Image (cartoon, rainbow, N blue to C red):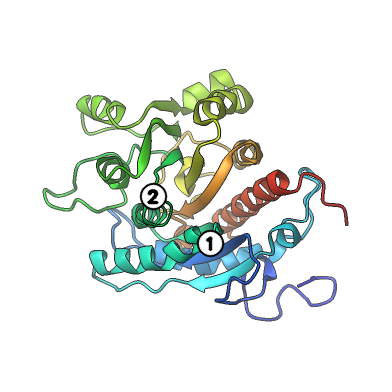
Amino acid sequence: MDASVSPRFAQVATFGRLPLQRDIGNAAAVFLGIPWDDATSYRSGAREGPSAIRTASRLVRPYNMFADVYPFRVLDLVDYGDIDPVPGYTEDTFQRIQAGLEPLFRASVVPFVAGGDHSITLPILRAYRAARSEGVSLLHFDAHFDTWESYWGTKRYTHGTWVKRAYEEGLIRKGGVFQVGIRSSLYSREDVTANGAVVDRTFTTEDVDSEGYKPLMDRILRSVADSPVYVSVDIDVLDPAYAPGTGTPESGGLTSREMIHFVRELHRANLVGFDLVEVAPQYDHTGQVTALAASNLLYEGMCALARRRKPKAKG
C-alpha cells in the first residue's frame, strides 16, 4: 500500500503494508512471523518481535535504489501471517513450525521469517530437509556460537543449542556452515573446540574489522557456490547501541550499516530462506531502533533475492 495514498499510521500493520493472505498464489517469497520465546536463556520477550517488526516496517518503501529493484513487485510478496506456537510446549511448537514451512519450501517459495527466539531456526531447517530432501549451507550472523550441548543439564532445545542440533540431524551441509559477528564471552575454552567441530569457519567481529565485509563475503560465497543457502540473523549481532531491544545483548557488535552491507551481498547466493530473530521490543528504545533495524534487514534480504531473480526491474 502506497503511503502517499494512505497514511502509514492507518490500516492494520503488515510487513511493508503488503496484503495479508494465507494463499501464496504466485508469490516467490513471503513474510511470516513466529511469536515464540519459550526457549530463551535470559530475557524473554521475543514473542513480541513479529508485531514490532511489522509496525516498524511501515517506513519501508517499495523501491530500493541501491539494488534497483521493486522487491514486492518482483517477488509478488505477501504477508503470510503468523504460525501459532503452543506456549509451554517446545516439541508441539516445533511441529507446527515445520508443518507451516514445508508447503512453502515444496513450492520453492522463499520465507522471510521474523522471530521469536533463535530456536525457531531448527524446525525451519527440518522443514526444508523434509520438503527438498537436502540440507542447506548456513550463514549465521550472531554474537553467540549457539552450538552448546544443552542448558541446565537437560534442555537440548534452546536458542543456544539449535546449531548443534541442526548439525546432528544432518540439516546443514558439511563444509557450508559459517558464522559472522561472534564476540561473546564463553563458559570455557572447550566451547571454541566444540564450536569448531560443527562450524566450518567462524568470523569474529575482529575478523570483520580486519577484513571488511566485502572480502569476507567473497570467501563465504565462493565456498557455498550454488548450494542452497539459508541465512539466520540474530539481531544481537548488532551492537546494543543499534539494537538494545534483545534478550542477550553483547557489547562490541556490528553497526546497522555494516550488517546492511552483508545482507546486500546475498544477491550472489542461492537464497532459500532467511530469518531474523531475538527482537524483544520491551527492551527497545522509545524510537523502536531495534525493530527498525530488523525490518530494514529483512527488506534488504528481500531486495537481494529480487535482484537475483530480476537484476533490472524498471518502474
Closer-to-camera residue (257/99): 99
Residue 15 seen: no
Q: Amino acid at mark 2?
A: Ser
Residue 164 falls in which quadrant of the image? top left
Q: Which one is earlier in the sequence, the residue at label 1 or at label 2? A: 1
* Figure quadrant of residue 66: top right
> Is 203 rendered above or below residue 61?
above
Which numbered dot is residue 133? Answer: 2
Residue ranking furthest to the right: 315
> Which residue lies at the image location 49% right of the left edge and 51% below the top edge?
244
Residue farthest toward the left in the current orientation of the protein: 153
Looking at the picture, which amino acid does disc 1 mark? Ala
Which of 58/149 is in front? 149
Q: Is residue 304 left or right of residue 146?
A: right
Q: Is residue 233 left or right of residue 294?
A: left
Circle 2 Cα neighbour tier, 10 Å, few/some/many (<14 / 14–19 / ≥20) = few
- Which residue was labeled with disc 1? 107
Which SS class for mark 1?
Answer: loop
| Label 2: which secondary element | loop
Give how far across and how far down residue 250 sits, in percent.
Answer: 41, 40
Residue beneath the point at 21% across and 29% down: 188
Q: Position of residue 25 (x, y in %)?
A: 63, 72
Front position in the image: 103 or 4: 103
Left or right of residue 114: residue 61: right
Neighbour tally class for label 1: few under 14, some 14-19, many 20 plus, Cα within 10 Å? some
Q: Is residue 221 visible?
A: yes
Q: Which mark is residue 190?
A: none
